[in-house]
Image (cartoon, rainbow, N blue to C red):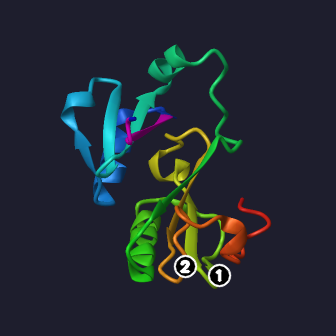
Amino acid sequence: MNNSIFVNLPIENLVKSVDFFTELGFTFNPQFTSEDTTCMIVGENIFVMLLENARFSTFVDKPIASKNSVEALIALSCESIDEVRNICEKAFTLGARRYKEPDVFPAMFGWGLKISTATSGNFSGWILLIFNNSRLRVNPMTQPFGTAHLQFPRKII
């Protein structure tokens, strides 16, 4: 079984998207890059395909969500709380919108940002949640969430 994940997301402008994420430290795979699509490398087996709206539309039979709606909530983990803060603060200086203050839970520290404002409305309503779960006392991959006694926010966005 394949163990890679490719998250496909619509964007308005590839150049603005690449510039924004490059500033945050991400790199791209040129093998999966064209004039309207690129592959952002998130981890060893985790990738985000950024597709301009016209290209994204060729894969779906429904309209792309408007900028005033939420289309996806994407969460990326970091090694430390400091790394979470550094990435988010850098994104804010690049124009990302802080839609709430950081969340501090017994097992997790997270900070969300809306990045559509960072690229002149380039992204169609998706929110990026950067988090660190170093306080997690169990491995969520091997132990069911019900036994981990985690507290999650009632309202994410």
Relative placement, left or right, of 114 versus 19 is: right
Q: Main secondary structure of the magenta part?
A: strand
Q: In this picture, is 116 found above or below 58?
A: below
Residue 147 is labelled as none
The quadrant holding residue 70 is top right
Residue at mark 1: 105
Which mark's residue is nearer the viewer, 2 or 1?
Answer: 2
Q: Residue at x 27, y 29 (%)?
A: 32
| Quarter of the image where one finds residue 28 | top left
Front residue of 139 and 11: 139
Percent position of residue 120, x then y: 49, 45
Q: Could you tell me which quadrant the N terminus lies in?
A: top left
Residue type for callout 1? Phe
Query: Which quadrant, please, contains the C terminus?
Result: bottom right
Disc 1 secondary structure class:
strand
Q: CA distance from mark 2 to mark 1?
A: 10 Å
In terms of secondary structure, where does tag 2 sit?
loop
Q: Earlier in the sequence, mark 2 or mark 1?
A: 1
Q: Which mark is residue 136?
A: 2
Q: Is residue 8 magenta?
A: yes
Q: Estimate how packed mark 1 is, as few (under 14), some (14 to 19) or many (20 or more) residues with alpha carbons within 10 Å.
A: some
Q: Amino acid at mark 2?
A: Leu
**Residue depicted at 55% across the width and 82% down the height:** 137
Tell me where residue 86 appears, x and y as whole percent.
Answer: 39, 75
Query: Magenta region: which residues?
Result: 2-9
Q: Residue furthest right?
A: 154
- Residue 135, how many percent across, how many down? 52, 83
Q: Are marks 2 and 1 in contact (CB under 8 Å)?
A: no
Q: What is the x, y in percent for residue 152?
A: 71, 70
Q: Is residue 35 magenta?
A: no
